[in-house]
Image: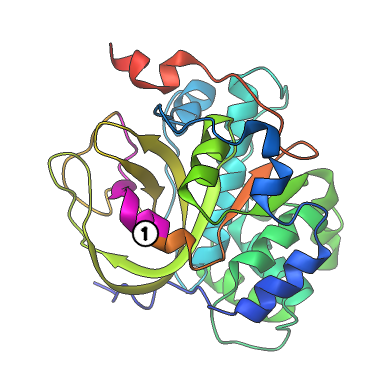
Amino acid sequence: MVMREILCGWNDQPDQVTRVLASLAHPYFADAAYPIMGSGLDGDVLLYKAWKDALGKYPGYVAQAIGDCVSFGTGHAVDLLQCVQMAVGKQNEAFEETSTEAIYGMARVDIGGERGSHQDGAVGAWAAQAVMKIGTLSREKVGPYSGQRAKQWGADGVPMHLEDLAPQHKVRTTSLVKTWDELCAALANGYPVTVCSNQGFTMTRDANGFCSPRGHWGHCMMIAGIRRDIPGALICQSWGDNVPSGPTALDQPDFSFWADRRTVESMLACGDSWAFSTFEGYPGQVLPDRWSYEGFA
């Protein structure tokens, strides 16, 4: 098995995060989402169930092949955001899975200025700005995932004839999420959050679907749920089906695991985690009861 450290790729560069924040209209989630702060703190939000509502099943995401995890975490967030809007009746377009290679190329080259560099990796802020400032491309336009394509576009950029199409599908707002309260407010209103940190985990889920913190990964993933029975958050992985392995809970996808609240708070404190919205800012949204414990009653 390929060492997990190789299939990470988050670069911890606080100066780059600061640079991106200075360019955003809504840099900090707590400020941008002030009217909805406090929501989600006393409940549970199984936002990942929007995938099933919109698609009839969870996505069959392939595993990343190089150190392009930042594009996977961001791509998964954009996909889930689409499905949330479809499920609550605010998007009529058919779902199109997001090309991670396009995010990777635009993040590294257009935003990060890494043209010509063949060393893997990106900053979460680069990808967050890329999908808002430039846009996204679907796999239908790009083709099935290719690690070789990701490597090439990460060094040379996305071909112009394709990048010219990216503005057709932009994320409207992205903002830095730093605390548990902000995470809860984002998810409770339908806004997925990427999480970039050096926190590693065990690779087997326990009886409740949790993995324990262990070791270090320079890694980007996506948070798609919070629970109150055992306080924690649902983290979606980019290493393929049933990774980590072991039992699942609350109908979670098999490419995910639960992590305890304290660990998640330390991950958010690394300062490169982002909420995504299709709106200007983060208006409150009423999510279906079936995306909570009500769906298991």
44 over 208 or under it: above or below:
above
Helix, strand or loop for disc 1: loop
- Residue 157 visible? The answer is no
In this view of the protein, which residue sits in the foreground, 169 or 192?
A: 192
9 over 70 or under it: above or below:
below
Q: Position of residue 235 (x, y in %)?
A: 39, 49
| Kind of residue at disc 1 | Trp
Q: Position of residue 94 (x, y in %)?
A: 67, 28
Q: Which residue is mark 1?
A: 239
In this view of the protein, which residue sits in the foreground, 10 or 12?
A: 12
Residue at 42% over, 42% down: 60
Q: Quadrant of residue 44?
A: top left
- Residue 261 part of the magenta segment: yes
- Residue 255 visible? The answer is yes
Q: Position of residue 92 (x, y in %)?
A: 72, 22
Per the rendered image, the range of residues in magenta is 251-265
In this view of the protein, which residue sits in the foreground, 23 or 224?
A: 23
Looking at the image, which residue sits at the far top?
297
Q: Position of residue 74 (x, y in %)?
A: 58, 55
Horizontal placement of 152 versus 39: left or right?
right
In this view of the protein, which residue sits in the foreground, 140 or 272?
A: 272
Image quadrant containing the C terminus? top left
Instruction: Check the image and tell me how it is coloured.
Output: rainbow
Image quadrant containing the N terminus? bottom left
Q: Residues within 10 Å of mark 1 (few under 14, many from 20)?
A: many
Looking at the image, which residue sits at the far left?
207
Q: Quadrant of residue 43?
A: top left
Horizontal placement of 82 versus 220: left or right?
right
- Residue 272 part of the magenta segment: no
90 over 64 or under it: above or below:
above
25 over 116 or under it: above or below:
above
